[in-house]
Image (cartoon, helix red, strand yellow):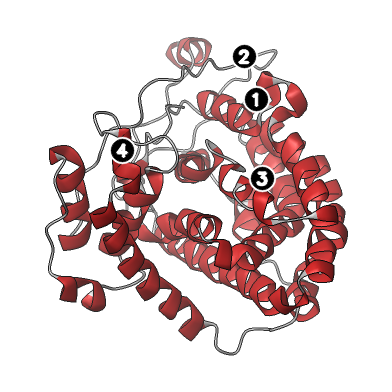
Amino acid sequence: MTRPSPSSTLTPTPTPTPTTVAPAAGPCLVEGRGELSGAVTRALRSGGPPAYDAAAVLKADPWGEDLQLALYLLYELHYRGFDGVDDEREWDPDLLRLRQAMETRLLHALRTELTDAPRSVEEAFAPLLVEPVDLSGSLSHHLETEGELWQLREYAALRSLYHLKEADPHVWVVPRLAGRAKAAMVAIEYDEFGAGRADRVHARLFADLMVDLDLDPAYGRYLDRAPAPLLATVNLMSLFGLHRALRGALVGHFACVEVTSSPGSRRLAKALRRCGAGPAAEHFYAEHVEADAVHEQVVRREVIGGLLADEPALEADIAFGCAATVLLEDRLAIHLREAWDQGRSALRSPLSQARVPAAEEEGVRG
């Protein structure tokens, strides 16, 4: 089967070139993928209320393209919004009513899937603190050892829906914490946002990575190509972040990401180096290897420890947030591996082939 783009090597440049990402208008709206997402798109374009059958929410697949895209569109109103959409729609009661119904559907599905999940922090996080002996099911291990450039480009295009707003959803928990937990959370977020330097903001570093991979670093550029399993991973943190009642789950999600980030980032940095993706691409993950190894200790001892000291009743919620994160990341990994193992794109539509640098073209012609 013909692959969406061949495995080629991009010639590294001597030093990373910072990417200038202008604070332009929000991303463009995309077409709906069913009744619910179609209703949201039409409502945002027209300025009117969403027109849909209330029974459609109950019938919708909680993991499907329609519900996940509809939720993503509504959550994005709380980030940068969309080009041509009035900022006032963020708190439109009709849109919020639809969002609440879909969130109820999704939360029910999550809790049903995780009925037997751990209820304590120790049980939830213990398996994540030990590198598994068998890495055959690990997506980052596959990319490190066998991944091709076109797969790394697809992975980056999908992850851009989060990484170009990296850490933003987690900031919502800060005013809902106190004492040790708040102080530690702010310290970690300070690093995520570049420690006072715009050129070191992690979202900026990811934009530089995308340029090295010949991808468009515009915010939200690849939304239309993103399948439901990817949308679900981003929606999860928005869901947890926007609800004070789910603050424990958001801390669990954040801790899960920090605990698993360092080893995964190390493997991805090696994968990008092996494929000759360029210094900025490698730098993004190399930065996370060191930073997240430190963050892991702080988040477990101070953020989780501080929150449990203040609100011990939230332990089950923290464990739930961790388990939900693992569940959706596993679903995404399965989706990607199934597509790639068949030699086809994991995106809803394939990326264009990577541009071959002029020097490489000359070598081929010579």
Return the residue at label 4.
Answer: 88
Q: Residue at (80%, 41%) from the top-left corner?
A: 187
- Mark closer to the chain start, 2 or 3: 2
Q: Residue 71: in sight, yes or no? A: yes
Q: Is residue 144 left or right of residue 195?
A: left
Q: Nearer the viewer, residue 98 or 284?
A: 98
Return the residue at label 1.
Answer: 280
The image shows residue 199, relative to residue 167, as above or below, that is above
Q: Residue at (52%, 62%) from the top-left corner?
A: 333
Q: Secondary structure at mark 4?
A: helix
Q: Secondary structure at mark 3?
A: helix
- Mark closer to the chain start, 4 or 3: 4
Query: What is the residue that sits farthest to the bottom in this orientation?
Result: 116
Return the residue at label 2.
Answer: 17
**Relative image position of residue 111 (x, y in whole percent):** 50, 81
Return the residue at label 3.
Answer: 268
Q: Is residue 24 left or right of residue 58?
A: right
**Relative image position of residue 311 (x, y in whole percent):** 76, 71
Give the distance between the C-alpha atoms of the residues marked 2 and 3, in whole angstroms: 20 Å
Q: Is residue 253 left or right of residue 350?
A: right
- Whether pointer 2 and pointer 1 mark residues with C-beta atoms closer than 8 Å, the reply is yes
Q: Residue at (62%, 67%) from the top-left corner?
A: 249
Quarter of the figure with residue 158:
top left
Viewer-nearest of discs 1 and 4: 4
Viewer-nearest of discs 2 and 3: 2
